[in-house]
Amino acid sequence: MILMKAYGKTTLTAAASVLMALAMIINESLVARTFGTYTLQLFDVENNSIWVPALGVILLIVAYIINVSGNEIIGKTSQFMAFIKIAGIIVFAIGGLWAAQFTLANVLPVSDTINNYSVASYIGAIALSILAYKGFTTITNSGGEITKPHKNVGRSIIISILICTIVYFLVAVAVNSSLSISEIVKAKDYSLVEAARPAFGNFGIYFTVGIAIVATISGVIASIFAVSRMTAMLTDMELVPHSHFGMSGSVQKHMLIYIVVIAITLTIFFDLSRIASIGAIFYLVMDMIVHWGVYKHLRKEVKANGIILITALVLDLIVLIAFLLVKANSDIFVVIVSAIGVVLVFAGEKWFLHWKEKEQGTD
C-alpha cells in the first residue's frame, strides 16, 4: 500500500485510507440514487418522490446479495454489464450527434450562456468531473483477483482511462448539441434522458434509461466488492477499528454489511448533488496526501516524475479551493459536513492508533 510505504503506520496513512474508502462508499450512494432517478423516468412519478432513495436502497441490497454470492458471479456479471453499458453509451452519443447534425461549433456552449458563470465555477466543476474517474480505484483494490497483477493492473487502468475519456467526451458533446446550458441545469439529475428526446423520441428515453440502469447496477456491484477488500485489508493492517458484533464469516463479509449500511444511510438522507460534492471533497483531500507522500518519500524508489507529482498536487489544491468557494456560496451545509467529516476521521484515527499502541505495549 502506497500510503503505508510513504508515511508508515501513522494517523496520516490511516485517515487518508479511510477518506478514500468513504469517497468510494459515497460514490456508491451517488450511483444508487442515480439508478432511482433514471428508473423513475419510465413512470409518471415525480423525481423528488420517496421512490428515488427507495429504489437506490433496493439496488444496494441486491448488490450486497450478489457480492456475498461469490467472486465468480461478480466477475461474470460485471463483464457482461460492462460490455452492454459501453456499447449502449457509445450508440447514444453517436446517435445524438448525428440527429443533432453535429458540427465543431457544438463542442463549446453558446457564448451568451457561459458568461453567467465565474472562473471559480468552471474550476470547481472539475471536482465533480473527477468523480467520473473515481472507479479506477476499483481496479487497484481488486488487484488480487487479476491475473498477473504486476503487468495487468497498469494496463487495465490505461485502457479504462482511454475508453472512459472517449465515451465521456462523446456523451458531453452529444448532450451539449441537444440541450442548452439552462436546459441541462433544469434537467439536472436526468439530463441524458432529456438529451435523448429530440434525437430519438420515446424510444430514446427507454434506451437511455435502460443503459443508465445497467451502468449503475454494474458500478455499484464492482465498487462494493472493491471497498470491502480495501477495508478488510485496512483491518488486517490494524489501521481501522473492527467489531464482529457476533457475526460469523470473514472480515470482508462483515465489511460488506457495514459498507452497504453506510451507503444506504447516505442514499436516504442526501440528494445527488450533495452526495457528489462531499465525495469530491474527501477524494481531493486524500489524493493530495497520496501525491505528497509519493513525492516526499517514494519518488526515487518508484522512479516517479517529481514535476508531474507536484503539478497534480497543485491542480488538486486549486480545484478543491475553487469548489469550496462555490459551495460556500451555494450550499454551505456541504462544506460544513465535509469539514466535520475530515476532522472526525483524523481525530478518530489518531485516537485509535494511540489506543492500539498502548494496548500492544501492555501485552
Image: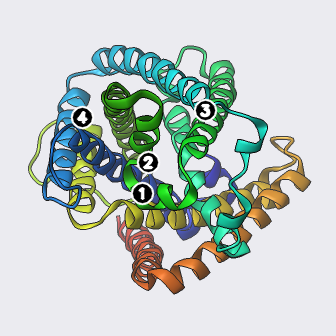
Residue 252 tag number: none
Residue 39 can be seen, yes or no: yes
The part of the image, by quadrant, that contains residue 273 is bottom left
Residue 164 tag number: 3
Contact between marks 1 and 4 (CB within 8 A): the answer is no
Q: Amino acid under label 3?
A: Cys
Position of residue 126 relative to residue 206, above or below, is below
Residue 191 tag number: 2
Residue identifier under label 1: 188
Q: CA distance from mark 1 to mark 3?
A: 21 Å
Residue identifier under label 4: 63
Q: CA distance from mark 2 to mark 3?
A: 19 Å
* Precedes in sequence: disc 1 or disc 4: 4
Q: Secondary structure at mark 2?
A: helix
Q: Residues within 10 Å of mark 4 (few under 14, many from 20)?
A: many
* Precedes in sequence: disc 1 or disc 3: 3
The part of the image, by quadrant, that contains residue 210 is top left
In the image, farthest residue toward the left:
246
Depth check: give the residue in front, 207 or 302. Answer: 207
Contact between marks 1 and 2 (CB within 8 A): the answer is yes
Contact between marks 2 and 3 (CB within 8 A): the answer is no
